[in-house]
Structure formats: C-alpha cells, structure tokens
Image: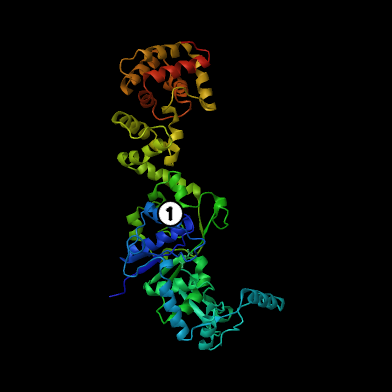
C-alpha cells in the first residue's frame, strides 16, 4: 500500500489570507481530498514582530469562509501538535542539537557588522553574489559551545557541501539543477535563538511526515537549501510541486495596485465563497481548454498536479466578477435570500430582527433583482428604489420620462386609475395597463418606459408590475405624480 498523502499549508500570520495564499491553500486542499490524504495547517509565526494573534484569527476565518477545512492544525489538533511554530521552539532546539552533534551545523560568531564589511569587500573584488566565507566553519564544537555559554552572540549555520549540485525533481517545474557552489552555509538559528524559515519549515515538514510540498514558486529558490537540510537531518525528501506565480492583468506580480488582494476584501464586496474557489482553482490549473465552471466536488474529482501549469497565472478581476454573477444566479431562491438579506440589513435598509411581514416583502424584493447583480454588495444600491419615499432620476431615466409629454392624457389616466385600484397586485396592474394601451393603440413601452423612470429613477428595472406591487400604491402614486409634474403634466 502506498504511503498516505500528507500536505500542508503553512502561512505566516501577518494579515488576511491573500489571493496567492488562498490559491496555495486550495491546491493543497484539493490534492489532499483527491488523494484521500491529510491537509495540515501550520502557522509559521516565529517572527514575533510581524505575527499577530489577530492575523491568526483572520487566516483561520478566511480559510473557513472558503470552506477549506484542515485535518490537523490549530483548533483541531492532531498527532504532531502543536501546529504553531512559536509553540515548537523546544523541538527546534532538539533538532539543532542533532545537527551540531552530527557535524552538519556549526556556531558562527561573526557579527552582522563584520559580515557586512566582508560582503562589501567581496563585491569590490568583483564577486556579484558574495557568500559567507566560512570563517567559523572549523571552530571545534567544544570550543564554540564554551564561547556560546560565555554569552558570545552567535548564529547557527548549516554546513553545505561545496561541490556538486542539488537536483530537484519538481512535479510541476520538472528537473531543476542548482550548483552547490552558489549556495552558502545559510543560517538555521538567529542570534535571538529563533529558527529561520528554512530551518523551522524543513524540521516541521519532516517531523509532520509531509509527503508533498505544494507552494508558490517564489520558494523554488529555497528548495536546494531545504533539500540539503533534509539530508543533514537524515530524513526522506518529500515531493516538491511549485505552483506558478500570480500576476495582475498587466503581467506584473499581483499586488494592491491591482485592487483587492485579500480574500476578506472579496467576501466584504459580496463575492460568494464557491465562486472564489472556482476562480482560484483556475489560477494555474485547468482541466481542459474550455471548462470554466466547477463545483467544489468536481474540482476534487478532477484536480491533479499534472495539469498545473509552469507559466504564471493572470488574475483577472473581470472574470472573477462574471463568475460570481453566474454563481449568484445559480443559487436556489432560499439560499440566495439567506445571503442577500444581511447585505440590506448591513446597509441599514432593513431592520434587525426582521418581522414576518417585512421578511416576506424583502424576500420578493431581493429575488426581483437576483439576475441583475454580480456581487451581493451591489444589492443596496441596486434596490435603492424600493426604499424611501422620493426618488432621484438618473440621466437615462430623465430622458425616458420626457417621452410622457407626448401622451399627457394617457399618463393622467394611468395615474388616476392606479390611485383608485382596489388591489394593487401584479395581476390588477397588468390588466389595467393592458386596457390602457389597447385603447390608446400604442406599444407597451410608450407607457412603461416613462412610468418606470418615474417610479425607479432608472431606465431599467425588474419587471414593472412586480416593482409596483412591492412598492405599494401610496409610494407609486406619489412618485408618478412627482415625475409627471416635473415634465409639466399636472395630475
Ligand atoms: N510561511 C511560508 C510562507 O508563507 C511558507 C512557505 C512554504 O510553504 O514552505 O511563504
């Protein structure tokens, strides 16, 4: 039986989950689910200055919002707990001891100032990428320990074999060869006693028995160092799979310049998690050259590393917006209403809690614009005409209303008849207007366009009868009278 797949998502909690992180988390999640494996969530929070408790909360919440549930990690525990690096410092100490004892690591007493001076000197000599010169490499361990015990500031470095090359068989990038001579004895433990990213990540990946490392290809350059570290620790290598970078539409690295980059911002703008998942999956992966819409389950069924591209992915906000609209239209009415009403409450258009009658009204109102919006956050603006008494007309609406001037009598009659209508229902309103246009022998639009403009302030709206019924007789009559008056038709 082959070994169980174990993957991990290892964010540094320094803010909300961003698009790139979410895509990495998703690929790990899909791979784990596809392979009936385990997804580990590990927080790389040893940088005390940048990692905050708030960020931890945000990342966990963002993961939950996306529905990316992890099998081991914060809140759920697991056999390799703890899953926060800041709680694993004793473990890193035991690992560094092992590396020192086996001669793979050594104490370095070179001060930052000294290193800087040497670096500058090497550059002056024409060395474009100066490396650590190995000054402390051969200090006997006992002597180094004594100096350290005396309080001399130090770091720990990994002893890298200088000759030969390190070959990585990356599942996505193929075979990548790094010459060892360009690597230097990199730092494992800083002067403050805390492990560096490369050290803590490898120690944990090995201890947590991670079989596949799926992460952004900005980490490809760290991989040869990490491979050396696996070897030094005597641990088997995982499979590496470096997924392509994400760029903005202008093909520069995705950043705030391109608009919102945090998942949370998209949640706030009314994107649905299922649309985000679908869209993120397409950032570097494709099933074929035509399918764009995938449910979560179909992504799990179809995802494979083989179909992940080497080439950078382009984040296209317009496509995400389009996709979100598709997902909104696809929601069943109950689910849509459940997600839509909070937007109106948030905007102060509906009270909380909602009484039964308001709920019933609001349900119909939000449903009337379901196929008109692409983001839930568009609702308050899109439905503004359902609220308040008076309405302001936009330019297009004003032009439509002007057309009423050609049929002043017709609009007066419409107003008067609507004012006395017994039941202000879709059916009654429709019957009334049909009678009017038949009698006047005009097209439906002649009556409806100015009416819609006066009532909604816009040139387009959901079905007019539905809008009128939801708006009610009083407000309809008031707005129609005001609108007609503004074009010189007194009622
Ligand atoms: N904490 C690292 C990051 O957020 C993890 C990189 C890795 O997956 O090894 O970039």
Q: As rendered, which of 382 and 313 lies closer to the eye?
A: 382
On the rendered structure, is 460 left or right of 363?
Answer: right
Q: Label 1 CB, ligand 1: below 8 Å?
A: no
The N terminus, quarter of image? bottom left
Determine if residue 481 is in view.
Answer: yes
Q: Position of residue 147 (x, y in %)?
A: 55, 83
Relative to the observer, which residue lies in front, 377 or 42? 42
Residue pointed to by mark 1: 58
Q: Residue furthest front?
A: 150
User: Would you call the spot at circle 1 few (<14 residues within 10 Å), some (14-19), or many (20 or more)?
Assistant: some
Q: Is residue 278 left or right of residue 154?
A: left
Q: Quadrant of residue 435?
A: top left
**Where 183 sits versus 295, above or below?**
below
Callout 1: SS:
helix
Q: As displayed, is residue 291 above or below residue 304?
A: above
Image coords of residue 352 (percent x, y): 35, 35
Q: Is residue 133 left or right of residue 101?
A: right
Residue at 55%, 51% in the rendered image = 258
Coloring scheme used = rainbow
Q: Position of residue 168 (x, y in %)?
A: 48, 76
Location of residue 309 in the rendering, given as x and y in whole percent from the top left corner: 47, 63
Q: Is residue 244 left or right of residue 40?
A: right
50 or 148: nearer the eye? 148
Q: Is residue 238 visible?
A: no
Count of marks, rendered view: 1
Residue lying farthest right?
124
Residue 99 in the image: above or below residue 425: below
């Amino acid at each position: 039986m082959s070994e169980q797949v174990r993957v991990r998502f290892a964010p540094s909690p320094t803010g909300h989950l961003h698009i790139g992180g979410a895509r990495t988390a998703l690929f790990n999640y899909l791979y784990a689910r596809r392979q009936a494996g385990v997804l580990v969530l590990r927080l790389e929070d040893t940088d005390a200055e940048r990692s905050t408790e708030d960020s931890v909360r945000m990342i966990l919440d963002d993961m939950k919002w996306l529905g990316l549930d992890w099998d081991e990690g914060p809140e759920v525990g697991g056999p390799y707990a703890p899953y926060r690096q800041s709680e694993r410092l004793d473990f890193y100490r035991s690992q560094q001891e092992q590396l020192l004892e086996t001669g793979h690591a050594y104490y370095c007493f070179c001060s930052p100032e000294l290193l800087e001076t040497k670096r500058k000197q090497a550059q002056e000599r024409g060395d474009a990428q100066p490396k650590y010169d190995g000054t402390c490499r051969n200090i006997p361990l006992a002597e180094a320990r004594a100096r350290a015990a005396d309080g001399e500031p130090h770091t720990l470095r990994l002893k890298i074999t200088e000759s030969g090359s390190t070959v990585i068989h990356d599942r996505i990038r193929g075979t990548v060869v790094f010459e060892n001579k360009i690597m230097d004895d990199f730092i494992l433990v800083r002067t403050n006693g805390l492990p560096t990213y490369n050290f803590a990540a490898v120690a944990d990946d090995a201890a947590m028995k991670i079989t596949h490392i799926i992460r952004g290809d900005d980490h490809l350059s760290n991989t040869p160092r990490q491979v050396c570290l696996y070897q030094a620790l005597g641990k088997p290598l995982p499979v590496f799979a470096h997924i392509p970078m994400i760029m903005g539409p202008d093909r520069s690295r995705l950043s705030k310049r391109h608009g919102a980059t945090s998942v949370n911002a998209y949640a706030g703008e009314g994107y649905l998690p299922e649309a985000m998942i679908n869209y993120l999956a397409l950032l570097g992966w494709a099933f074929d050259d035509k399918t764009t819409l995938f449910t979560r389950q179909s992504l799990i069924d179809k995802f494979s590393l083989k179909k992940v591209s080497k080439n950078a992915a382009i984040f296209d906000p317009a496509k995400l917006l389009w996709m979100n609209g598709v997902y909104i239209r696809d929601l069943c009415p109950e689910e849509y209403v459940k997600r839509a009403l909070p937007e109106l409450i948030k905007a102060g258009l509906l009270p909380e809690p909602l009484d039964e009658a308001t709920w019933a009204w609001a349900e119909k109102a939000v449903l009337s614009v379901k196929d008109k919006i692409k983001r839930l956050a568009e609702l308050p603006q899109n439905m503004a005409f359902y609220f308040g008494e008076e309405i302001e007309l936009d330019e297009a609406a004003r032009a439509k209303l002007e057309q009423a001037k050609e049929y002043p009598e017709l609009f007066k009659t419409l107003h008067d008849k609507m004012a006395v209508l017994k039941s202000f229902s879709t059916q009654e309103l429709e019957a009334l207007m049909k009678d009017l246009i038949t009698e006047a022998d005009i097209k439906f639009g002649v009556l409806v366009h100015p009416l819609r403009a006066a009532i909604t302030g816009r040139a387009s709206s959901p079905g007019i009868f539905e809008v009128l019924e939801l708006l009610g007789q009083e407000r309809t009559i008031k707005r129609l009278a005001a609108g007609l008056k503004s074009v010189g038709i007194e009622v």
